[in-house]
Structure formats: structure tokens, C-alpha cells
Image (cartoon, rainbow, N blue to C red):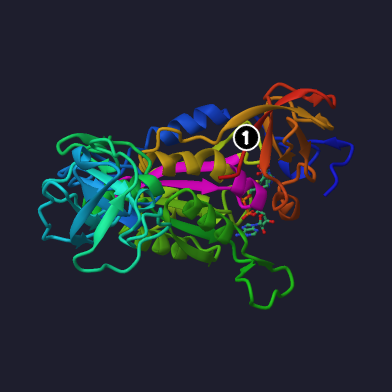
Amino acid sequence: MTAGPAHGSNDPCCEDAGAPAAPRTWTVDEHLADVLAAAAPLPAVEVDLLDALGRRLTADVTAAVDLPPFDNSSMDGYALRAADTAPVALAVVGDIAAGAAELPEVGPGRAARIMTGAPVPPGADAVAPVEWTDGGSGTGEAADAMTAAVAGETVQVLRPVAAGAHIRRRGSDITAGTTVLTAGTLLGPAQLGLLAAIGRATVAVHRRPRVAVLSTGSELVQPGEPIGPGRISDSNSFALAAAARAAGAEAVRIGGVPDDPAVLRRVLQEQLAHADLIVTSGGVSVGAYDVVKEALQPLHGGEDLGGVDFRRLRMQPGKPQGFGRLGKDGVPLLALPGNPVSAYISFELFVRPLIRTMLGAPDVHRPVVSAVCTADLSSPAGRRQFLRGRYGTDGTVTPVGGASSHLVGALAHADCLIAVPDDTTALPAGSRVDVVLLTD
Ligand SMILES: Nc1nc2c(c(=O)[nH]1)N[C@H]1C(S)=C(S)[C@@H](COP(=O)(O)OP(=O)(O)OC[C@H]3O[C@@H](n4cnc5c(N)ncnc54)[C@H](O)[C@@H]3O)O[C@H]1N2
Ligand code: MOO
């Protein structure tokens, strides 16, 4: 993708088409604040450890056991009394594998073969690695590995061994009763390993939000179906459901709800039974068949689902937006514009932070970095523009494609958004810009 000379706003679809009076508009930040005011972390659910990957603890976790749970050897070798070494020949009184429950007593002048992780037997206070011994070969030469056990063998210990050497003490890692992970901790592989190590089979994390993603529009066909005249493939429901899952939610995709308010209201009623969040795309502008707007305004029959506020935001793309709470439980609904880039950017800016709030994440927003833009930019006055870009490791950012909100090809090659401030209309190449990084 090439950047082109001047990236920016001259997309007719995004211009105000001569609105008679100036209706109220909202900034990105005002809208985001209203959306987030509707969000709280979801309650705890106890899940199997692997299902907790990438989720956050709802409560502190306390270890019920010591780790290690018993004194054990860190080497394959011989458990012995440090006072007996060395060089010395010791009588081998037994063989202790990891997992052994019955342990031989190691008296003076004696040793027991011991494997890494096996319990240190009574009487022993140190372990000589096999390489420090002749391994019971009788040659008096240092062994390089353990050989098969020989009953009644003698082992030659070739060098002194300090008391405590090669013994991992009970509780030296974790002591029973201590808090090992605190509420809010993000569970990655190491944390899940720790939970397993202390014997936890399940753990309490925030329930994943169940997000219903609906695309509206009688022009939509599902991918794989023939695309007839005037029809287009439904891409939003896939991009938005995927984005919801990537954010940590469970997403149900309902593709291609027709421009019929009664049908949409029925679908919404069904989804309200189990959704924590509903996201629609399309049907929020000022056209004759803007079905989301129609269905969610109380005048259009059926039971009133609840209040949705349709707004114009001072941003591009993503100007028309709806937000409200539906049903008796006040399930949040975000009605995103239909243009695919508008829908996706709206998801990133408003829906993703809401999902992450429900997941108990402290960092609900994408990281924003400062970068030097490699191209001239233009932007509409009074609207924050989000151009698609590629962020370079050298601290630069390069626009990808133009500003129009139908450019899904360019979107798929972008890894960031270039945020042009509300009141900036032109920026020469070399200017510093804020860049929202989209990569997980
Ligand atoms: N007279 C005006 N017209 C428009 C204005 C305006 O202010 N005055 N705003 C424009 C802006 S900005 C946007 S954004 C769109 C938003 O319109 P809707 O949310 O009602 O979306 P639709 O009309 O349903 O669709 C717009 C566009 O996107 C395509 N689309 C819709 N859904 C999907 C989907 N699931 N997958 C792929 N593509 C989809 C649809 O076919 C249209 O091309 O309104 C402008 N108009
Ligand atoms: O600018 Mo529209 O807002 O294409 O999303």
C-alpha cells in the first residue's frame, strides 16, 4: 500500500450534508465517558486453569502447601552425611526415585542413591552429585552418569560435600499460608503454573462478557453466498465478533439482520436473554432505512426495549453512533455505523474498553505513542480524525490508504491509527502525531 500525497478527510460520506441547525455533537472523550459509565467488572466464575489464561483473578490466592512440599535433591547422586566426606567409600543402603514414599535411614558411613526431585532420606544432610563420585563402579574414577543400581554396592565419594549441598528445602519457594497472587493479576503461563504447583485445579476470574454482534442491512449477503446486484458481503459481523473475542469476550455473531425494525427488535429481544453487551453495525445514519435507529425509537411498535441515544460524534470516521441500555437488566448496546472502517474504529475506541472493563482490566485502552508522520495529512476542522497507519520501529508512522471509511483493503494492512487532533486541519510531513497501536 502506498501512502499517497495528502491523507485526510475529503470523503463526501463524512461531510455534514447541510444540516439545517447545528444539532448537539459529542467529542470522542465525552462519548467514551458515557459508555464506560455503564460498565463494571463482571462477577467471578470458577474456571479450570487453562480456561483462565489471559484473564484476571477476582481474589487473592493463598498457598495451602509449602513449595517444595518436602526437602528434596536437586541432583542425581548420593544422599549422605556431610561429615562423612571425602574422599571416602560409603555403603549404599538404598535407591530413592522421585515419588518414593519409603525412605531408607542413612546412618554414618552410608549413602543412598537419590534422583533429582526425590525426598532426602532421614539421616542424610547433603547430596553428592554422581559426577563427584565413582558411581559405584569400584574404579575410583569420576562417573559421568548413573548406572543401574547394584545391591550392596559401595560408592567412592571423591570430594568433600558441604552440609545442605544440593538439597532444595521445604518451603524455600512458597510457604503455606502466604498470598502468592493478588486479585487483579493477569494470568499467563507462569501464573497458571504456580496455581497448578500449589494444587489448585480451578481459579476464580471475571466471567467473560457475552457479546452479541449483529450486522444490519438488507443489502448484506453472508460470505460464500452469491453476491447479487447491489448486494455486498457482510464483513462487519466477522470483524467485530473477532475483535470482541480478541478483547477477551465470548462473541455470538448474528449476520445480516434485514432492514425491518420488527425483525431487529425480535432479534434484540432474543439476545437480551443472555447477552452482557450488544453491538450492532449499520442503520444509524439519516437514511430512509436506518433500521437500528427505527427499531430502538419507541414509536415503532412492540415492547419498548429501552432508551438508545443516537448521536453525532466529532470524529472521522465514526460520526453517527448510538448508545443505550436495553431491557430490564439495562444491557448496554452500542450501535456502530455501517461503513466497515467506521465500525471497526468505533469498536476499538468504545467497545473494546467496555469489554476490558467488564474483564476487570486496569488498562482498558490501547497504548498511545508519539511518532513522526512520514506524509502530509489533512483533517476536517472540529473532528478528531483516525487515519490508518503502519508504525515503524524507527519511531515513524506512515498512513495506509486514504481517509474514506469503506477502505477495508487498507485497514487490513494497518497496525495503528493516527489520531489527528480535533482542531488540526493540516500537518506537514515530519510532524509528531499520536498513534494508537492496534496490535495485541
Ligand atoms: N445524508 C447523510 N448521509 C450519511 C451521513 C450523514 O451525515 N448524512 N453520514 C455518513 C456516515 S459518516 C456514515 S458512517 C454512514 C453510516 O450509515 P449507517 O450506519 O446507517 O450504515 P449503513 O447505511 O447501513 O451502511 C453504510 C455503508 O456500510 C456498508 N455496510 C453496512 N453494514 C455492513 C456490513 N455488515 N459489512 C460490510 N459493509 C457494510 C453499507 O453497505 C454502506 O455502504 O452514513 C453516511 N451517510
Ligand atoms: O465517517 Mo462515517 O462516520 O464514514 O463513519
Q: Is residue 254 above or below residue 385?
A: below
* Element type where label 1 sits in the image: strand
Name the image quarter holding the C terminus: top right
Q: Is residue 233 above or below residue 272?
A: below
| Residue 105 x %, y % | 10, 53
Q: Residue furthest front?
A: 139
Could one spot residue 2 in this view of the protein?
yes
Instruction: Tell me: 305 left or right of 155.
Output: right
Name the residue rendered at 57%, 43% in the picture. 346
Name the residue rendered at 62%, 35% in the picture. 436
Instruction: Tell me: 164 left or right of 317.
Output: left
Q: Residue furthest bottom?
A: 226
Q: In the rendered structure, which segment of residues is drawn in magenta?
A: 320-345
Q: Dot 1: few (<14), some (14–19), or many (≥20) neighbours within 10 Å?
A: many
Instruction: Tell me: 30 left or right of 191.
Output: right
Could one spot residue 24 in this view of the protein?
no
| Residue 309 x %, y % | 46, 39
Amino acid type at circle 1 is Val
Name the residue rendered at 59%, 34% in the picture. 313
Residue toward you, 227 or 113: 113
Task: State the image quarter where residue 138 is shown.
Answer: bottom left
Residue at label 1?
Answer: 436
